[in-house]
Each structure stands twice: as C-alpha cells, then as structure tokens.
Amino acid sequence: MKSPFVKRRGATPLENGASEALDEVLITVVTGDKQGAGTDSKVFVILHDTEGNSSPTLRLNNRMITNKRGQSCTFKRKAGIPGLKALSMIEFWIEKFGVGAAWFVDRFTVRILKTDEVFVFPVLRWIKPSHAHMTLTVYDLSLPQDTPEKLLPQRMTNLGTKKRLYRYTQHVPGGPAQIENLPSDEKFSEDYYWTFATEKINLLAKTKLIEWTTSKWKTLDDLRKVFNQSLGEPKCMSVWQEDWWFGLQRVQGVNPNVITACKKIPEKFAVTEETVSGLLDDMTLAEALEKNKMFICDLEITEGLPHNEKAELPSPFALFYLNKEDKLMPVAIQLKQEGGHDNPVYTPKDPSNTWLVAKMFYNCAEAQHHQALTHLGYTHLLMEGVVICTHRNLSPSHPLFKLMAPHFLFLLAINTRGLEKLVSPGGWVDNCMSQGLEGIFEHMKRGFDRWSFEREGQVEKELEARGVMDKNILPYYPYRDDAVPLYQAIKKYVSTVVRHHYDTPEKLTGDYELKWWREELVKPRDQNGVGLKDIPGNAEEGFTSVDEVVDTITSIISTCSLGHAAANFQQYEQYAFVPNYPGILFGKIPTEKKNYTEEDIMAMLPTKRMTLDIMVITKLLSSRGTKSLGDFEMQYLYDPVGVNAAKEFQKDLKRLSLEMKKRNIDRQWEFEWLDPEIVPNSISV
C-alpha cells in the first residue's frame, strides 16, 4: 500500500543500490509489558521529515522482540532523505510471518546519526498484521483540533474501537458503572499476576502450622499467640483497648474521613452535660463545644442495611473530646441512631468491658463504611467508571489521556478479579463482614448517591467540609498533614501539563474530545455514563476554564494514588487482630450496660477459620504491587514539558517523603501510608 505522505527529492529505493549519500538513522523499537507482546512478523517503517520528505520503506528484521518488559532492538538504516535534520512523523505496519502476529509496541525512537538528535514516537498500542499503516507524530501528542487532517480518520477509528471494547454495565442495580468485559489490554502483566498469585500461596503456607478449625477462640491470649506463629503481630495488639488508641484510629486509621468538628450535639444523640461530666478536663459540654474541643463520628448511612443474620449492624454515633494534651479521647458512644431505653449512651465511666464492647461495635460499623465506601466504593469502583470513560472519549494521542493513563494501570484487572474472588456470593465480604454481600452493595449505592466532586472529590475541600482542615482546631491529624501537601504536589504537576496544552481559551473550547469526556462523566449511570455529581463546567460548554480541568484531573490522579493508599495499605495492621477493628461481630447490638466477661467477648469474634481468611486477605491487600508514585511503569509523555514536569514532580515527592519521615519521629503513632515511597501510581491491589 502506497503511503499518502510520500514526497521524495529524487530518493531511490534502497534495494536499487543508490550511490547518493544518504543520512543514516538508528531505529530502536521497544515492546511493551503485555502477555504475548512480541512478534516475528515482518515490520516496515517509513520516516517523514519536517520538510515533507519521506524515506523509502525500511524493513526491520523478523523475530524482533520477546515478551519481556522493555525489551528493545535497534536497527541501523539509511533514511534516504538527503540533509535530514528533523523528523515529523513515522509510519509503520506489520505483515504476518511465522507464528507471531499482533505486536504490542511501547515506542519507536529514531536517532539521526549526523546530528545526534533523537525523536520519540510513543505507540503503546497493539499493532496487528495489516496493510493499513499506523502513523504517529513526534511524541504522539495533540489535541483533536490540532491533529493533522490526514490523521483524523485514524484517530476517530481508534476511538470507535475503544467504544466497542470499553462498554459500561451495572452489576448491581443502582450501583457504580463497571466494565462489561475486561479488554485484553487491561489484564495483569505476566510478572505482576504471578507475584500476586504466589504471594497468597506464600501467606497460606505460613499459617499451615496452625490448627485452623471452625471453632471459636477461647481467650484473647490464644488469639494473640497465633500471630507469632504466622504473619506477624499487628502493632495495635498491645494498645487496642486504650481510649487514646480509639481516638488515633479516627485520624490515622484506614478510615480517616469520618471525624467531624462538632458544634452541636445531634438531637438523636442522647448526650447531656451529665453524660460526659468529669470527662472533659475542667470544662462543661457547652464550653467544650464553644471552644471547638468536640468532634463527632456519625455513621447513620449504615442504618437499616441488610446484614448477616447472625451479626446485627449498628448505625452509631461516637463523640470525642480534644483534651489538654491535644489527644482525641472518646467520651460517648450510642450504637443506634434513635435514642431510647434499649439504646443507652456508653461512656468511659461504664465498667471497662462494657465500654470496650461499645467501642468494638462502633469499629465494626465503621469497618463496613471503610470497605464499602472509603476503600472499594470511592477508589476502586468510582475510578473504574472514570477509566472506561477516558478510554471511550480521549484518544491515546490526547495529552490528558497520557497524563492520567499511568494511574489507571491494572485498575480494571484488580476490580474484575476482586469482585470475582472477594465481593461475590460466599466470598470474603459475604462471610467476614457484618453487612455481607447484599449489605455492601446497598451501602455503596447509598454512598454513590451522596458522592460529590465538590466535597469527596477534592482532599482539601473534603477536610474543610468536615471542619478539620484547620490545625488550630485539630492539631494532630496525620492523614490531613500528609494528604494535603501530597495533593498539592499532584496538582502542581497536573497544572504544569494542562496549562501548557491549553495556553489559549480557544484550545479549551475547541477540544471536542474533552467535552465528550466530561459529558459522559456526568451522564447518569443508567444512561451509559459514570454518574459523577458536581463535576465543574456545564452541559453546553463543557469545562469553562483551565482551572476546572486541573481540579478534575488532580482529583482523579489523587484518588488513584493517595486516596487508595490511605484506605488500603494498613488493612492488616487494623483488621488482622480482629477485636481491634472487627469486620464482623456475632450476636445482637448491646441494648443495656451489661458487664461483659472475656468469654462473652470471645463469643462475638469470628471463628478460627474466619480469622485465617481475614488475616490472609488483609495481608495480601496491604502488599504493594506497582511502583511508587511518580516512578511510572509506562511512560506516556515524552515531550519536553511533560518530561520536565515529571522530573519536577519526582523532586517534590522526594522532598515530601523526607518531610513525612521527619514528622513520623515525633508522632504519637507511626503513620507512613502517605509517604510517596509507599504510595503507588495506581489502584493495582
């Protein structure tokens, strides 16, 4: 097939043996990290320079690449363009030869030996044997309205293909938008999948020496001993009964997004001056409220959720006081929303085990909220819809696609596998969480109906909405103190790239792919959209300012990185020793201030077999599979602005990492989960 771009200055095909001095180039091709990515097909290339000249068809050798990540081959060829100084485009195609067929190409680089200039053409696509040519510009980076006219059909065809591959479904009526069928490009790489699978086998092997049965634990000491023999002791085991630890869980646990400044006690919460008398240093309740010393957690969202028939689910309030030492101390817990004779308010003045059981039931309710919303709902599943929408509406050549793509790695794959193994009938959630499968789906539905970009979508605004952004109000809040600067670093990186590509108002208004993208983000889920609320902009114009684009992209990258890291990586530390943060407690919600025995408490806890499942799954979920934030597994942006922005981002992250390590020295309890060295690029586990 003749190239539509060919224009030669008397260049002669190389096979004719021309004697004219032709400029030599080194063409390097790199195969991506996909199963079966290599090819032994015939590979052909045509180079185009900035003067409109084209090379002859250059053939590259067969049996080029293996399946290994980053495998590359370099070929020295004569370009056939006299005086070649700069390249503008590359055409390439493959013709089937031997066993290998489709080829996943990461990139081509072309070095002009005479000038030593290097031109990069990122591909990051499957190329199938065909006489049709794939043509890419340098950096393969353009807004749709700036795409060369001859390349527009290719761009539109690619989007059409993506729309067929990335299709929405709702596995749960009213639930989040999810992928109908996992595209092959989204599957785990061979290396990553193997690591993930073998890690679970290794964890199970470490617990083999323990006699796991369906019987209950007899004493807390029996339960404690099992960790020494298997997966290691969670640090909380020695302090889990302490009130100061219960306070710390609100500001640096797996669910640090519930604690709210309290100006007034809710009418449903039957707390009076007498209730908390003696628990507020020398203050009255009215004084403590007035001086911003009171904080509250309200889990009314769990009220009436379906639940395991043997495990009732609270919908509690918990009230906290910031004491003179700036420690957040629990002073009252009510386990149901409506007060009454069978719903007392528990306080530290009650018998120690009575108060302990109240804290355990509160934590059990919060664990349901954590898994349904903070973890699974507001990171994994919220972003699944965003990933699908991005593939359907932004070309791989779009700068915003390239900016977000590293943060989507393996997300659809882990969601597909996670739902299949963990959130399914008889799976981990069904067996080891009080809300069970039906409950978690209803919980997520409620949460998705409430989620707003203007609140949950942005770290700083979410903190402000809860009244805890100000350090003078809540001095010790490790989640906030680490999340905010990390969010700002991400925003700075995003802003640099976005403002470069939308440096005039016309570029923003002319970007029809961006408008399609926003339109589908806000479209209701039952109408083939993602259903996100309060995304900035409007239906007529799309995004109306560059600031709106920056905020939206920052929110997405932040959710895929720091949002998921905060909710995920300390799950073993919180959940594994079950009394500390119980995913399930058997029996009815307490209705009176009973003085519980240790035997009573042990009867509430999961069986030995369930404990094993909780330990292994939370250990697995707490492991990291992909690289640290900013150290991208796949590089998409090769243009100078993108490359320099990434380098600056990496410098900022390194500085933040050092600052966080310093802060940890003086903290009440180590909080390392938002250290950029620990935060991955994407939701991959």
Image (spheres, helix red, strand yellow):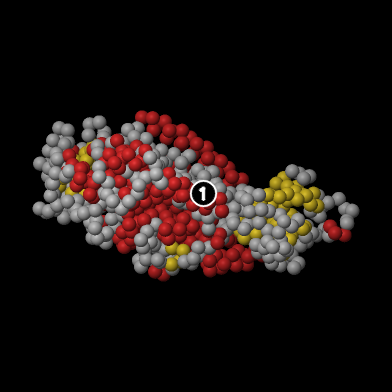
In this view, 446 is above or below 350: below
Q: Is residue 615 above or below residue 440?
A: above
Q: Nearer the viewer, residue 356 or 111?
A: 356
Q: Secondary structure at mark 1?
A: helix
Q: How many marks?
A: 1
Q: Quadrant of residue 450?
A: bottom left
Residue 142 as seen in the image, left or right of residue 469: right
Left or right: where 197 falls relative to 612: right
Say left or right for 189 vs 352: right
Residue at 13 percent of width and 46 percent of height: 594
Left-right relation of 15 to 478? right
Q: Residue 291: x, y in percent?
A: 21, 38
Identity of the residue drawn at 63% across and 49% down: 70
* Residue 527 higher or lower than 315, as above or below: below
Please state which of residues 135 and 88 is positioned toward the viewer in this rendering. 135
Residue 266: x and y in percent read 18, 50
Query: Dividing the image into 4 quarters, which one contains the N terminus?
Result: bottom right
Q: Position of residue 376 (x, y in %)?
A: 38, 54
Q: Amino acid at mark 1?
A: Thr
Image quadrant in which you'd find residue 521: bottom left
Q: Which residue is mark 1?
A: 195
Instruction: Give x and y (percent) for residue 370.
Output: 33, 51
